Image (tube, rainbow, N blue to C red):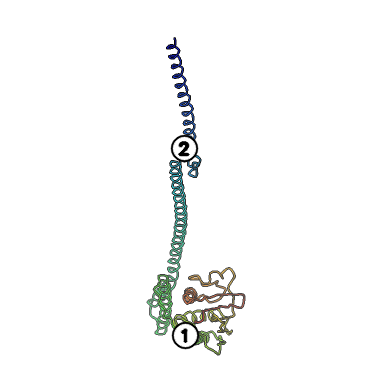
Amino acid sequence: MRTNRLESGLVLFVLSVVGTAILVSALAGARLVGALTRPIHDLIAATRAIGDGDLGHRIGNDHPKEFAGLARQFNRTASQLEAQRLEVQERQAGLEDTISRRTAELEEANERLQRLDRMRVLFLADISHELRTPLTVLRGEAEVALRGVRSSEEHRETLVRVVQLAQQMGRLVEDLLFLGRAEVGAVRFEMQPLELEDVVEIALADAEILADERELVIDAHLPDGPVRVEGDAGRLSQALVTILDNAVKYSSPGGRIAVELSRTEIEACLRVVNGGPGIPKADLPFVFNRFYRGRAERGSTDGSGLGLPIAKWIVDAHGGRVDLASEEGRTVVTLQLPLRG
């Protein structure tokens, strides 16, 4: 009996130990599962967030140390991915900006080329028109001279007219060559210090010859002191003669032309004022355009219409500017050049 009781006690003890072990194992397993479930759940959630594009998602630091290293590595990887994405976005934005800017430049260049092409067509048409008229007259004069017998005086008159037309065509060709060279930068300037009043006096000497033919008087007022500028005396004289020639051409016979040279602290100023018919307001924006010669009511329309554009180009190349204002009975051309520093 005693053996049976001992055996029964032993069985109960073993069973209690086994039960306790099972209970402890179950509790430990439950605790372990709980400890593993939340980090794994957070890791899965973070992975999904990254996969959905949320590169700013991070895993918290309140995990067991077994997962702390994995969480830190995951967060570092996410940070690197986020930095790379920001860099790619910045580069993409810069590339888009560059493409947009280049596209705008190409569109502008294309518009400029189209505009230049239209100008070229118009330019060639204007050249053809300007050359056709003197050529037609020249051929007509020659044909008339060949018809029948003419006196020596008549032949002389024809030859004089032929020479005048040849000179007119020669000036037109020279002007066209000048403008063509100017556009490609082939016109060279001999820039040097000079006194502008000396250049003005040379231009006035030429202009007075033209003025005498139309019984015009030129009143010139030059400053007592020197007006020093940096420039090409020959080119500046060419521009001034052109301006004075226009003043003579469009002045009423017997009138006066006022020429005044002055200076400020920073620039020299030359004003040329002439009477006669003014320039219509509708034409003022085009006075420096090639082949512009004004309305017929202004009087003379001789010339190629290239003088003022050339004069303006010369002055612009010297860092100056030319302005023209006109009203009935009065036209003022103002030329300004920077003083020599």
Residue 177 or 267: which is nearer the viewer?
A: 267
Q: Position of residue 114 (x, y in %)?
A: 45, 60
Q: Using the numbered discs, state the Cα–Cα distance from disc 2 to disc 1 in whole angstroms.
A: 85 Å
Front disc: 2 or 1: 2
Q: Position of residue 132 (x, y in %)?
A: 43, 70
Q: Position of residue 267 (x, y in %)?
A: 54, 80
Residue 237 versus residue 131 in the image, above or below: below
Residue annotated with mark 2: 43
Can the viewer see residue 190? yes
Near mark 1 (Cα within 10 A), the count class, few <14, some 14-19 or many ≥20, is: some
The residue sitting at the top extreme is: 1
Residue 85 or 18: which is nearer the viewer?
A: 18
Residue type at the position of mark 1: Leu
Residue annotated with mark 1: 194
The quarter of the picture where residue 145 lies is bottom left
Q: How many marks?
A: 2
Q: Residue at x 55, y 69 (%)?
A: 285
Residues at marks 2 and 1 touching, judged by CB atoms closer than 8 Å: no
The residue sitting at the front extreme is: 2
Q: Secondary structure at mark 2?
A: helix
The quarter of the picture where residue 168 lies is bottom left
The residue sitting at the right extreme is: 328
Q: Earlier in the sequence, mark 2 or mark 1?
A: 2
Figure quadrant of the N terminus = top left
Q: Residue at x 49, y 27 (%)?
A: 27
Q: Position of residue 89 (x, y in %)?
A: 46, 50
Residue 286 or 26: which is nearer the viewer?
A: 26
Q: Secondary structure at mark 1?
A: strand
Residue type at the position of mark 2: Leu
Can the viewer see residue 259? no
